Amino acid sequence: MSGLNGTVPGTLLGLDFSCAPSSRKPLTLAWGRRSGMVVKLDKLGEVATLAGLEQVLASAPGVLAACDFPFGLPRPFVQALCEHPPSDFPAHHLAALRQAVQQAAGPKATAAETLIHALHAHCQDRAGFQSLVDGWGQTWDLQRGNGPKLLHRPTDTAVPGISSTSPLQTRYVPVGKMYFEGLIRLVQADFTLPGLRQGRPDALAFEAYPGFLSGEVLGRRSYKSDQAAPAEQQHARLIARMDLVDALEQGRTRLNLRLKLTPGQRDFLVSDAKGDRLDAALCLVQAAWAQREGEENPTHSWGLPKVVDPIEGWILTA
C-alpha cells in the first residue's frame, strides 16, 4: 500500500481530533514535511467543524496523515456484536460484518470499513454508539452480564508504562465517539489505511497517539488541560510543554527525528495550555516516522507489525 505510482506521499499531516469540534475546541492540523531526520512544521491550522475536515480530506492528495483517534475496536466487543447482536441491528450489515471478521489480515481485508459502516447504519450518531456500548451485557449479549466494558486492544498497551484510552470509552475522554466520527470520514474520503483498507494511493492515514511520545519524554508529568487550574499547576504544565518541545527539537526520542520550528512556532506550541497544537505536532512527528519507514522498507510496512488485526488496528510507533 504505497503512494501514487509506488512513491511515498511527501506532505505530512498530524491531526488532533475531536468528535464534536467547535470554535472553542477546533480540530488542530499540523502540516509539514521531512528531509532525512528533520521534520519541518510548515503550518498549523484549525477546523471548527467535521464538515470542514471532510473538505480538507477530500482535497488532500499526496498526503500521509497521522490521526489521534482509534481506527479499530477491541475484537471481543465486535465478536459479541456478531454472535449476540441487538435485535434491531440491520440484517444485511450484520451478515456482511460476520463475513468480514472471518477474513485473514492483509491488503484485501475489509473488516474495518464494514464495521464502521455497520455501526453507522445501526447507531445513526455518536449518542447511539454510546448507547450500544452501554447496552453490552444489559440489552444485548445478555449472557455477558456486568463485566468490565472498557477493554483495551493489544496496541493500546504495547508501549511499556503507557496505555492509551480504551476505544470503548464514550465519556470523559470520549475516545469511542472519536472512532465513530473519525474513521468514517477517512473511509468516505477513500484514504488508504495500511493494514485495514485499500483506497486512494496518494492519501494514507494511520492511527496515532501523542501520549506515546509525550510519555517517553515526560513520564507522568501533565502538560495540558482543558480545564482552568491553579497558577502552580499551570506553571508546571507550561514547563512540561517547554521540556517536551525541547526534546522534539533536539530529537531526544526513540524515533530519532528532530522537529524544526521557528521561534514563533515554538512559542505558539508552548503557549497552548490545552495542548492541542502540541498534540498535532506530536502526530506530525509520528507521521514522519511512518513515512521514513515506508521509504526505507521496500514492502512499505510503515513500521507496522507484519500482521495487523483488521478489526483492532495498530497505533504508529507502538
Image (cartoon, rainbow, N blue to C red):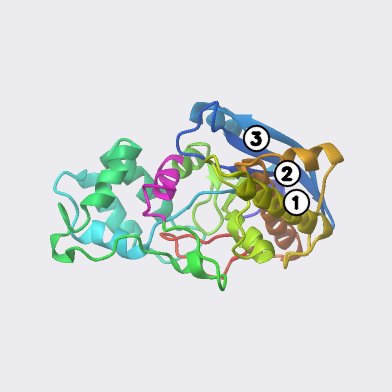
Q: Quadrant of the C terminus?
A: bottom right
Q: Report the side of 42 relative to 52 (left or right).
A: right
The residue under the point 65% across, 60% down is 213
Inspect this view and state whether residue 202 appears.
no
Q: Which residues are magenta?
A: 167-181
Mark whose residue sits in front, 3 or 2:
2
Quick one: SS at disc 2?
helix
Q: Amino acid at mark 3?
A: Ala
N-terminal-most mark, 3 or 2: 3
Contact between labelled residues 2 and 1, with CB atoms less than 8 Å apart = yes
Q: Report the side of 204 relative to 255 (left or right).
A: left
Mark whose residue sits in front, 3 or 1:
1
Using a 10 Å C-alpha cutoff, classify the residue at mark 3 as few (fewer than 14 neighbours), some (14 to 19) or many (20 or more). some
Residue under numbered circle 2: 270
Q: Quadrant of residue 47?
A: top right
Q: Amino acid at mark 1?
A: Met
Q: Quadrant of residue 263?
A: top right
Mark 3 → mark 2, Cα distance in angstroms: 28 Å
Residue under numbered circle 3: 60
Quick one: SS at disc 1?
helix
Residue under numbered circle 1: 242
Q: Amino acid at mark 2?
A: Val
N-terminal-most mark, 1 or 2: 1
N-terminal-most mark, 3 or 1: 3
Using a 10 Å C-alpha cutoff, classify the residue at mark 1 as few (fewer than 14 neighbours), some (14 to 19) or many (20 or more). some
- The residue lying toward the viewer, choosing from 103 and 37, is 37
> Measured from the top left, where is residue 222 in percent x and y?
60, 55
Using a 10 Å C-alpha cutoff, classify the residue at mark 2 as few (fewer than 14 neighbours), some (14 to 19) or many (20 or more). many
Quick one: SS at disc 3?
loop
